[in-house]
Amino acid sequence: MIYNTNRKTINSAMSDTAFNFSRIGIIGAGMMGAGIAFEAAKAGIQVFLKDVTIEQAQQGKAYSQRVCLKLIEKGKMHTEQMEALLDNIHPVTDYDSFQNLDTIIEAVFEDLTLKKTVIQNAQSGLQTEGFFASNTTSLLISELAKSSQAPEAFVGMHFFSPVDRMKLVEIIRGKETSPATVEKARQLAQTLGKTVIVVNDGPGFYTSRVFFNYLLEAISMLLEGIPAEQIEAEARQAGFGASPLAVLDEISLPLMLHVYDQFPSLSASQQRAYRYLNTLVAQGRSGRKAGKGFYNYGESKTIWLDPTLPATAPANESGTIAKRLLHVMALDSYRCLEEGILDNQSDGNTGALLGIGYPQHTGGVFGHIDQVGLPQFVRECEQFADKGEQWEIPESLRKF
């Protein structure tokens, strides 16, 4: 089914011009920056990988060596190929090496002030036709572009972790991003062997915004008194790439709070989740790295039962938890289509399947709506109306 939201689609200008990428700069040699450097070096591009110290930059390059050694063990790479790839990565600590670059990608910590500073300091290293990309999870591209001397040549390129295994790149148009810049970003991503979706700017863009609803719904159910182990089990049975509470532990609860802090405003449901996460962090339960979060980590990984939560769970029919997780993401995907974050259903399905672990058997978020049937989908979403603002149904969806 095609959901026509009666709005004008913004199309990026496709070009027959092939842009050649030979030199790129990457700022931030952590997991994301190192992963992007590996993919670019594998594609034969000279990569200038910058961090604050040469040790950190070299550690970023060492990541590529570790990936290569694993591939060699599996017979998927030869030693000579590894050496050639590593020769393409140049660890640096300042911007003097950022000269005549085709692209600069910043992959520093998700902090607006830090990213703006990096953008201001690095942009002079671009060649005339080059563009600047921000690898951000949720920060507004249009806001970051204000720190650029050429906002039309500024774009979001949201890679997924681990970069060498995740195939998706979400390209985000800012308000002033030119079609030519979008096309260059698309071609760079494809040069790196990635599948591309192009979305428009907004808090969390598409993939992060919808994925945050997945995490939010799990926390909401937990606060309602639904046992954590039941939430996790039904998420796994439904086919999600990772269960929500385990994901929160992996990304760390403080980082999730930091993401919420970057949002312009929070709904009542988000505020409830924020307060609960803040309480857990104050108790030292900040996630896997701390040894405890929603799970306890030691010799084995075991779910933690919070004694402060309601002791009696409301009656839940089998499959209700999975339904809530599936439906809430599909419903917000429709909102993204209606609001113009998404240009089409195809990008929504691709982004959900390849970027955020939506169950493959559904065919994606819009495929899920079609499988359920639109009238039934709306009726079932209405059943959860008292669970929070995330269940508000756009009037346009009721009219189909």
Image (tube, grey):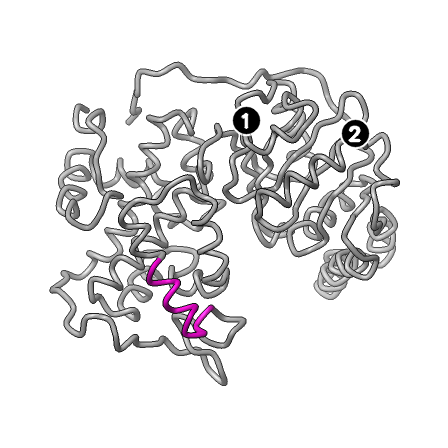
| Quadrant position of the C terminus in the picture | top left
* Quarter the N terminus occupies: top left
For label 1, the SS is loop
- Where is residue 94 drawn, in percent x and y? 84, 46
Q: Residue at x 20, y 36 (%)?
A: 373
**Closest to the observer: 369 or 259?**
259
| Within-10-Å neighbours for mark 2: few <14, some 14–19, many 20+ | many
Look at the numbered disc 2 and give the secondary structure of its residue.
strand
Residue 53, quarter of the rendered image: bottom right
Position in image of residue 308 (x %, y %): 25, 74
Residue at image coords 33%, 36%: 366
**Residue 128 at what x, y percent from top left?**
80, 21
Image point 29% across, 69% down: which residue? 228
64 over 145 or under it: above or below: below
Is residue 91 left or right of 154 when viewed as pictured?
A: right
State whether residue 196 is above or below residue 9: below
Q: Which image quarter: residue 5?
A: top left
First of labels 1, 2 by sequence position: 2
Percent coordinates x, y for residue 268 in the rendering: 27, 48
Q: Which residue is mark 1?
A: 174
Q: Which one is in front, 379 or 125? A: 125
Residue 353 lies, with reference to residue 125, above or below; the image says: below
Magenta portion: prevailing SS class:
helix
Alpha-carbon span between mark 1 and mark 2: 19 Å
Left or right of residue 118: residue 276: left
Camera-side residue of 116 and 314:
116
Q: Magenta region: which residues?
A: 275-286
On residue 126, the disc is 2
Q: Amino acid at mark 2?
A: Leu
Whether residue 370 is in magenta: the answer is no
